[in-house]
Image (cartoon, rainbow, N blue to C red):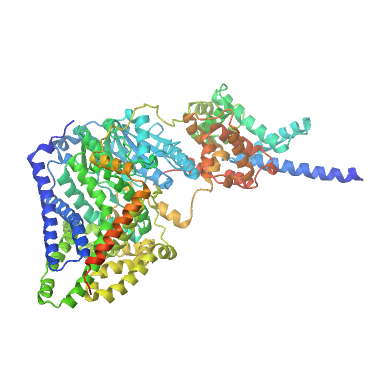
Amino acid sequence: MASVNKTPATAAGDQSAWNEAYDRLLNFLRAFELDDHAYVSQLAGEIFRQAKERHREDPSLSPTVLTLELAQKRLADWLATNLGEESRTTSQILATGAIAMLLSKVYQTAPDSFLANPVPEELRQALRETLLVTGPDLNVSSMTPRHLDYGPMLQFARQTWHRWEVKELAVAILFWAGVYTFFYWWLSPIP
Amino acid sequence: MNETNHHTPDFVVRRTLFLGLSTALTATGFVLMLKSYSGQKFWEDYVTLAVFPLLFSQIAVGFVLALFGCFDKLRGGDRHHIMRGAWREKEDSIPLAATAIVVPVYNEEVSRISKAVANMWRSLEKTGQIEQFDFYICSDSTDADHWIEEECAWLSLCTTLNAFGKIFYRKRRHRINGKSGNVADFCRRWGKRYRYMIVLDADSIMTGTTLVRLVRAMEANPAAGIIQTQPYMVLGSSLFRRVLQFSSKVYGGLFSQGCSMAQMSSGSYWGHNAIIRVAPFIEYCDLPLLPVPDPGKRHVLSHDTVEAALMRRSGYGVWIAYDEPGSYEEGPPNLSDMLTRDRRWCAGNLQHFWFLFARGIEMGSRLQIWIGLMGYLCSPLWLTFLVAGSFGAYFRQRFLMFSADPEDLSAASNSGAGILLALTLTLLFVPRLLGVLTTLPRARQFGGVIRMLFSALLENILSCLLAPVLMMFHTLFVLLTISGMQIKWNTQNRADTGLTFTHCLKLYGWLTVLGVVTCQVAASYLGNASWWLVPILAGWILAPLLAWVTSGRRLGLLFRSAGLFVTPEETDPPPELLGLDDGDEESQTGTAAPSPLWVQALLNPYVKAVHLSMVRQGSHNSVTPSRSLTALRERLIKEGPRGLTPKEKQRLLWDGESVFWLHQQLWSRPAAQMHPGWIQLQTESSTSRLMRDYLMADNER
C-alpha cells in the first residue's frame, strides 16, 4: 500500500522538475533573442531530449542542472568550433562568442544556424572577423602635482594650528565675547 | 612659454582701467556711506561700514565688467583676442591634431549622454574632420545599474555610428578625487596619444564646427593652454530653468566678454566645454593637496579655477571664447537642485582661499579666485550688513527721538543715503539694462521686442525675490563649510521633474516663518525704515511658493507658448540639440530600463559578454575567489539582487570570473536553491528585448 502511494508522488515530483528544466531552458535560449521562435522551440526540444537520455543513465542528476549544463556546453562547443579559439577558457569563448553573434547579427541574419553544425561559411567568417575594440592601448604618462608654495597664509595657519587646541580656542572666544559684551553694555547709549 | 600680451600697453591700460574704475566706484560708494552715517554712530554702524566696501566692490566689479563687455560688443570685438587672430583668414587650411573629447560621467542619465555623443559625432562627420577626434566616456558611476546601462549605451553608439576604435568607454575602479581625478586618470592612461582634449560635462554638447574651430585656434596659437567657450543653457522646460537660460543668454555673454577684455589670457576655466592642451596640463596642472591638517580634506573640490591658475602659472594662456556659438549645457531644473550644486561649489570656492596667496600665481588668476570666493562670502556679509544696519537704524531712531537736537535731525535728513541708493541701483541694474540693449537687435530670436522686454522684467522680479533666499542658503553653506561639515558630491539632476509642495514647505518653510516674524519685529521697532526690508522679506515669505511654482514643466511650457523667456536655441534649434530632451518625456511617462538592470550582466548573454569584455581589461579577475567573494556570490543567489549593498554589487561586477560563474549558476540551479526573485528575472531577461532595446538600439534622432 505504501509503495503504491509513493510511486505517483515521485512521478509528480519528477514531472515538476522536468517542467522547471524545460521552462528554464526555453528562457535561456530566448535570451539570445533569435528571430526564429520555432527554431528556438525545436532547439529546446532537442537539448531537452538529450538531457532526458542522460538522466536515464544517471538519475541522481537534477533535471535543471543537467539540461542547462548541456545547453551551456553545447553553446561553448559551438562557439569554440566556429570562432576557432579552442585554446581559450570557456568564459572567454562565451564572452567573445556572444559579442561576435551580436555584432554579426546572427539573431537576425541566420537564427537557424545558432548551435547548428556546420554553419554556413559566411557566418563562420563573420563570427571570426568580429572584433570588439573596447579601449585603445595605454600610453601611460606621469601626472603628479608640482610643488606649490602656499605663501604667508600657510605659515600663519601652521602656527595657529600648532599653537591652538580646541579647548584653548573655546576659552579665547569666550574671553573675547565677554570683553565685547562688557564694552557693548558700557558704551550703549542710555535710553 | 611666455605670453606677450601681458606686457603690451593695451593690456596695461585695460587692467588699469578695470581696477581703477572698480576701486573708484567702491570708494565713491564708501564715501557716500560715510556721509550717510555722519553724526552719532553706534557699534552696529561700524560693522555696517566695515562690511560695506567688500559688498559694494562686488557690484562695482560686476558693473565694470558689463561696461567693458558692452564697449567691446559695440566696437565689434577685441582684435587682440585669440579667436580673432590672423589665423581666422586661412582657418580652413590649418590641419587638425589628434583630439580627445572627454565626457566624465557620474550616475548621470545615460540616454541623454549617448544622444549627445551621437549628435556631436554626426556634427563632426559633417565637418569632414571626424578622423581627428576620439570620444572617451569616462565613468565614475557608483550605481551598478548606471554602470551596466553605460556599457550597453557605449556598444549601441559604436554599432549605430560604426565608431569602434573611436568611441571608448572606461569605468574607473576607484573613484579618487571626483571629476578632476577622472580627467587626470584619462590623462595618465591615454593623454600622450592626443595633443588636445575637449572636456565636457554629462549635460554638455558642442557643435562639430565649434569643436573643429577650437582645435584650429589652439594649433594657430601655441601659447594657448585652455580656451573656454561660453556654454549657453538650453533644453529647459521648467520655468526655473527657462528663466536661467534666458538670463544666461541675455546677460551672461556680456559679463564673459567684459571679463575676457579685462583679463585677456588670464581668463577663467569652468571645467567643461573647453579645449585644453594636454602636455602642459599633464605636466603642470595636477592639483596639489591643500595644506590642511585633516588628510580627508586635502583634495581640491572645485578643480577648474585652480587648473586655470596652474596653467597660467606655467606660462600658457587661458582664454574665454565668449562669442563662439555652438557650446551648450543644461542648467539646474529647480531651486533645490541649484542649491545642491551651490553647496558643492561653495565648498570648492572657499578652498580656493589657499591659492589666493600662493606664490607664483598670476595676478589675473588671483582676481578670478577672489571673485569666486566673494561669490559666496558676500552672502554672510550681506546678512551681517542687513542685521547690523537694521539695529543701527533702530538705535538711531531712538537716539533722535530722545536727543531732540535739530542738528542731528538735519544731519539725518541731509545724508547721502539717497545718492548712495541711486548709485547702488545703477550698479545693480545698468548691467542688466546693457544686456537687454545689446540683445535688442536680435530680439526676434527672443520672441520679439515686447516679449523679450517683458521676459527681462519678469526675470528681474524673480531674481530680486530669489536673491534673499540664496543669501540665506549661501550663508548656511559658508558656515557649514567653515565648520568642516562634509559636502557630498551629488549627481546633478537634469530632468525637469518638478518639486512637491511638501518638499518646498520643508526646505523653505523656515524662511517664510523668519520673514513673517522679521516683518512684525521690523514694523514694530523700525517704523517707516522697515520698508527698506520689504524686498528681502517678500523673498523669504514667498520662498516655498516660488520654489514650487518655478519647478514644474507645465508653467514653463505655458510661458514658452506665450513667447516668454524664449532663446535663439528654441526659435531656431541647432541640429545638435534635437532629441536631447526626449529623456524628459520618458521620465514623465515612466519609460525606463528594466530594473535592476545590473543583474542582466549576470543573466543576459549579450549584456554579460559586453561587461566581461570591459572588465577583463582591468585583469582583476579571481581564478580562485577569496572566501568572502565566494560567500558574496552565494548570498546573491540565496538572497536575490536586492540583498546586496551598492559596494557589494560593484565588487561582484568587477570580478569577471564571478560574473561568469554566477551566469552559469543562475541559469542552471534548481529554483528551490535560489531566491524566488531570480525566476522572475530570468523570464524578464528572455522577454525584455534587452539586446535590441539597449545594446543594438539605434541612436538615430
Spot occupied by residue B615 in the image (x, y as percentages of width and height) = 49, 33
In this rendering, would B409 be left or right of B627?
A: left
| Residue found 47% across the figure and 33% down from its top | B614
Lateral position of residue A138 relative to residue B593, left or right:
left
| B508 versus B147 height, above or below | below
Residue that protrudes farthest toward the left in the picture:
B9
The answer to whether residue B27 is above or below residue A64 is below
Can the viewer see residue B466?
yes
In the foreground, B351 or A119: B351
Residue at image location 54% in from the left, 25% down from the top: A83
Which residue is farthest right?
A1
Residue lying at the far top in this picture: please name it.
A87
Asked if residue B321 shows in the view, the reply is: no
Across and down, in percent, residue B469 comes to 32, 62
Q: Residue at x 54, y 37 (%)?
A: B652
Q: Quadrant of the N terminus of chain B?
A: top left
Q: In the rendering, at what x and y percent does residue B643 appear?
A: 58, 46
Q: How many marks?
A: 0
Q: Is residue B397 above or below residue B657?
A: below
Q: Nearer the viewer, residue B275 or A105?
A: B275
Q: Quadrant of residue A81?
A: top right
- Residue B496 point in image, percent of width and height: 39, 57
